[in-house]
Amino acid sequence: MTPIQHGSSSPHEAPSPPLNAQSRYSGTKSGEQKTTSPSPPSIWQTIYRVLSYTPKRCRYDPANPPKFSTALNLLFAFAGAFTVANLYYNHPILHLLADQFNVSNERASLIPTLAQAGYASGLLFLCPLGDVFPRRLYVLALVLFTATVWLGLCLTNSFALFCSLTFLTSLTTVTPQLIGDLAPPHRRASALSVVASGLLLGILVARLLSGVVTNYTSWRTIYWLAFALQYLIFALLWLFMPDYPSANPAGITYPRILYSILTIFLGHPLLVQACLVGFCTSSTFTSFWTTLTFLLSAPPYAYSTLIIGLFALIGISSMLLTPIFSRLVTDRFVPLLSVLIGLACALVGTLIGTYTATTATATVAGPILQALLLDFGIQTAQIANRAAIYAILPTARNRVNTAYMISAFAGQLTGTAVGNHVYARGGWVRSGSVSVGFLCVALGLCVVRGPREEGWVGWGGGWGGLRRIGDGKETTVEKKEEGRGKKANINGAVTE
């Protein structure tokens, strides 16, 4: 390219700039060269710069790692609570969403179904990337994406678009699983309990706020509130979340991480048993809470969204009772005992609520008792199951937990879809009967394999009583499970 020159064509004129520098010049005039201002950064470059910038107090120093303070733990609990709440705002207002979008109640139940499907997909495909990308940058990107896309839920009048955005925002609502394990080993258990309490609180608050706010304003108000909360979480995490180093300095590939989850799952009978039980209990949980909205909003109850939302307060009892039960029973006895007790409570509550709520003398006592016993029973069973599987392979707890959580949310997806489908065709009793069936299957899965059995089926080692304390049999089982995990753990797998 010949540069544009002005003035005389004398051979004494200044030479043309080199080709690789011409873009910096606008031309020459009497030997003078003028530079142009650089082009402004694109919007994507600006977003990346904001996300990747780390305040000085949050930068990681190996010689002086950031302190995992109580305030930081509470921040993670707050972020987890109001992130997972995104999945449950729609539960008390499904009948209003059905009216808004002019669809049937069964069609409206597709919204929580897609939310659970999105979250389960995120657990499988996005959570493992937490071991690949820098954790702070990855978490901030997910929160910002969720908050921005959430705006569409606040504005759209299209049911198809609302469902699509629900799936998309639920897919990236997995940050609680990415910040729960950042505590140092000596504080990890207590930190996880705080974050887990935050998650349960988020579920309860989502239902409560949604019912109360929608009773006095439009249903869109709760979605606008969630939109603001997501950006608040983003700002707080950007200001205070430390820039922890990658958990995968060796550079394991993403496909290898996914494959290792499968091999670990297939190599441990205890994990398979816990996942199947978790699937059944989770399906019962979501089937009850989504169909409950349709039951209470119709005769003979005909409750407002305020009253329906207040049912979430029942869950506070289980949130308070479960830690006490875990300390007195789960920590002392084999986890299977707590699982059986939890399933029995859930089954009794489901039987009471299912077969008394629609009789001629129906009272709200049936659904209340079902909510209380079901929440307590399922929480108890899930905590005991997770306590059991964490002993399987300490070097791969993240992947073990991923396998379990995928099963649990696949159960929630199934419960929402099947429960609402059956409710639309057969009513409350048939839907509840399906839940009874799921719980009976879970009990059967517990019965076919004992707590000390080393194989897939049987009761080798007997019941045994107290858990781990001075018991060589339990230690033998745990060592064998860990041995299986080492064989299933492929070369280069991530370790905690």
Image (spheres, rainbow, N blue to C red):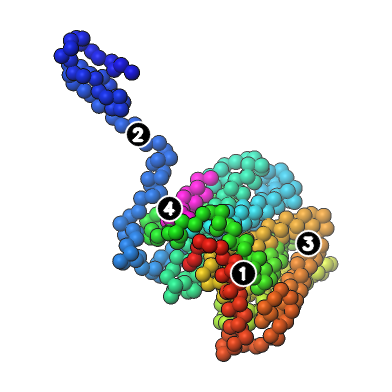
Image coordinates for residue 99, horizontal then vertical, percent = 70, 46
Between disc 1 and disc 4, whose residue precedes?
4
- Please give the residue where the numbered disc 2 appears in the rendered image: 40
Label annotation for residue 137: 4
Label annotation for residue 431: 3
Is 95 in the magenta?
no
Foreground tag (1 vs 2): 2
- Please give the residue where the numbered disc 1 appears in the rendered image: 315
Image coordinates for residue 301, horizontal then vertical, percent = 74, 62
Position of 178 with respect to 281 (left or right) is left
Whether residue 257 is situated above or below residue 344 in the rendered picture: above
- SS for dot 4: helix
Q: Amino acid at mark 1?
A: Gly
Front residue of 339 and 314:
339
- SS for dot 2: loop
**Label 4: how many Cα within 10 Å (few below 14, some 14–19, many 20+):** many
Between disc 1 and disc 2, whose residue precedes?
2
Q: How far apart, in angstroms, are the residues tagged by discs 1 and 4? A: 34 Å
Whether residue 3 is situated above or below residue 177 in the rendered picture: above
